[in-house]
Amino acid sequence: MKKLFSVVMLLVGMTVTIVAQTARDDIKANPWLAGSNYVDYDRQLPDFKYTAAPAGYTPFYFTHYGRHGSRWLIAEDSYERVLAPLRRANQQGKLTATGQKTLQQLEEFNKTTDKRLGDLTTVGERQHHGIGKRIAQHFPEIFKSPGVAIDARSTVVTRCVLSMVAECEELMAANPTARIHNDVSESLQYYLNQPRSGKVKEARENMDRKAVQEFSDKNTHPEHLMMLLFNDPRWVNDSIQQKKLMRNLFEVVINMQSHDDGYDMLHLFTNEELYDQWRIDNVSWYVRYGNAPQTGNVMAFSQYNLLKNIIETADTCVTIGKPQATMRFGHEVCVMPLACLMELGNCGASILDFEQLEKYWRNYKIFPMGCNIQLIFYKPKSGEGDILVKALLNEREVTLPVASTSTPYYYKWADLRKYWSDKLAKFAQ
Amino acid sequence: MKKLFSVVMLLVGMTVTIVAQTARDDIKANPWLAGSNYVDYDRQLPDFKYTAAPAGYTPFYFTHYGRHGSRWLIAEDSYERVLAPLRRANQQGKLTATGQKTLQQLEEFNKTTDKRLGDLTTVGERQHHGIGKRIAQHFPEIFKSPGVAIDARSTVVTRCVLSMVAECEELMAANPTARIHNDVSESLQYYLNQPRSGKVKEARENMDRKAVQEFSDKNTHPEHLMMLLFNDPRWVNDSIQQKKLMRNLFEVVINMQSHDDGYDMLHLFTNEELYDQWRIDNVSWYVRYGNAPQTGNVMAFSQYNLLKNIIETADTCVTIGKPQATMRFGHEVCVMPLACLMELGNCGASILDFEQLEKYWRNYKIFPMGCNIQLIFYKPKSGEGDILVKALLNEREVTLPVASTSTPYYYKWADLRKYWSDKLAKFAQ
């Protein structure tokens, strides 16, 4: 494993575009983006202006993988591990007025977390009502077609199922004749949330955790936050695991965007601190799930079964040729590596230098809460000609890793199918 | 605990009507009814002819608890414990042609059970599409009202959530302006599937299991079935736990009605055997969940929190007075005792003699797959007069345990609310 940072980039046969506005600028303009996988989908919406299909083409098949919407934090101690040191400080008279207010707000909020860890919130439910409604609006040729067959499946995790519910309700509202079949089952997990195995499991186990930890430590500066919360620097030095508390508090504060009745506590962090915390997460997520050279460029293949299912289901639905949709619901640990595996836009970038990563790859563009990948298949109305396909990542048009047709964002399905199939076959060798 | 059977009936201040056609007749006419909690809802549909509301009244609030639809069997060994002895017999050449065909069909079917135990089937999904569609058709004043607010919740078990999905999709199809909020959470379990505690837990622990076992043994006659399956009576006597195999095979065979692609294997049992197997289950379910004197007439109070929630939510919705619906999804272990607690029709019967039970209380009328309790609230259009309520058990009008108005099946909510509240308060003392 590489332990030295380097500006060398591995551009493995793919175009990597440098994004104009910096991540620091992005986060300054919208601090909630610092949330990485906690970003509220509705706080990063695109303009929904799409390139028209080539003349004579009509959409007929829609295939999709979407993540659940906003949720409570998951870990048993997500909230307690922040409350405990603040309570202790309070008992010993070590909190500032800001520290006391912070503790009081966290105590209030903590009441809502009882038996709610990991649950979809009303924010998350609303995200999926919005997405479902827009899917039907954007592709009426499919979703408003009489008797359209929609196959909708979810992982066995409740917040994913509820996300599916919200979208399916909107699809039914848009077209009461739709025939939706819903399924949720352990028997579908092998592709809806594939367990790690083989080369992917190995690469994860052999990951250079120290390099990631060093990057995290280097970018965590708790001094300002400690001064805000506590009135006794010596006591803080002796009694508080400062970097740990900062990370844990950041997680709670940044996930307040997942709650309609959460507190806005962003003022506890400076813009620069939010940016730093995000950089740490960007690197950590990239190495664990992206097309990262640090983990042998294999982590995206964690979604091998999912991409295979997408191709094979498309084979069936393209052959049938009638309006149909395949909806799948799951997790960011699937959407993100899938986007990398599919090489949507910049997602597949292979970047060796942690410091440079954010120029090419920013997680908030890939996996906010409710993130989704949509592939739309178009056929010639005349019946003669190639099947075309377009991809949307979070409802934004994105490039695909084959030669485009004369219309941007529209690709020949035969080309894409071959490219992805060859890639999967090569990995499986 | 009573150990002697007796013809004495405890009629604790309630009307108990003897049903005209015997259970034996019912099962002869429709053998699938022998399935108790496995009965396919759509194989026991009523005629949907309802008593009109009194003049000047309109429905405005709908409250509901429904069970998930048909499912695969649940226990790890539900299928294996039948296959194992048949495989053993096959290896030793002890199966008849019928036995061999039975084994072959079960082996085929067993392939579909992999990672599917407890899953909702397509039969179950269809049941709820039907129920949801009819709910909107039967009460358009509520469900087709512009912007109707529907609060739909489910236990955390996937088949219940999927049942909710199917109904909500139909409610949206019927009214695209409906505003549905769905919720599934451990934090709702306390009333959606209340854990056993206190007097209920105690009564269950002290239950006279021996009496139920004796009734089961007395009514299990495996001789005919063993002759059908096996060619060597002596081997059967030495090698097969006959009654156990009969019970287990019955469960698999009778639950074939839960599958669109199941095998019809009813021919393995005579009508009388099906009836006997049902009688055993009728007694067993009654004692464990009904208003059974054998368990101190407390088991129905297992749904204390659920009935309390129904009353309290109705208090809010009646006050608001606008079209609203409260949908709850869960299990037969809730619907059945709730029906007993509410004293819907004959459900609350307290019967001491196991032999007499089926004259008054038949489980297949209460908890088929997809079973549901609907309460519909009516208000005077003029704004002046009592709020009335009507109850449907599996979409059949049923009586309630207070004095009726001049219109059958319509009761004053104030009377019913007081009756149920007093009953709960007395239990809680």
Image (spheres, coloured by chain):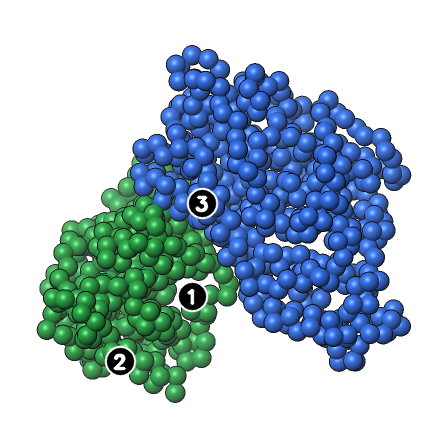
Chain colours: A green, B blue
Number of the label disc, if any, that sits on residue A193: 1
> Which residue type does callout 2 highlight?
Tyr
Q: Which residue does the numbered mark 3 point to in the structure image?
A: B167
> Against A158, is A190 above or below?
below
Residue plotted at (54% across, 60% down): B260
Which residue occupies the foreground of this view, B227 or B20?
Answer: B20
Residue B140 in view, yes or no: yes
Q: Which residue does the numbered mark 2 point to in the structure image?
A: A419
- Residue A24 picture quarter: bottom left
Within 10 Å of disc 2 (Cα), the crowding (few <14, some 14-19, many 20+) is some
Asked whether, in this view, residue B234 is left or right of residue B286, the answer is right
Chain letter for mark 3: B
Residue plotted at (77% across, 61% down): B246
Residue A357 at x, y = what percent? 22, 70
Which residue occupies the foreground of this view, A92 or B68?
Answer: B68
Residue B68 at x, y = what percent? 54, 48
Asked whether, in this view, residue B98 is left or right of residue A302, the answer is right
Secondary structure found at label 2: helix
> Against A137, is A401 above or below?
below
For the residues bearing labels 3 and 2, Cβ distance under 8 angstroms: no
Secondary structure found at label 1: loop
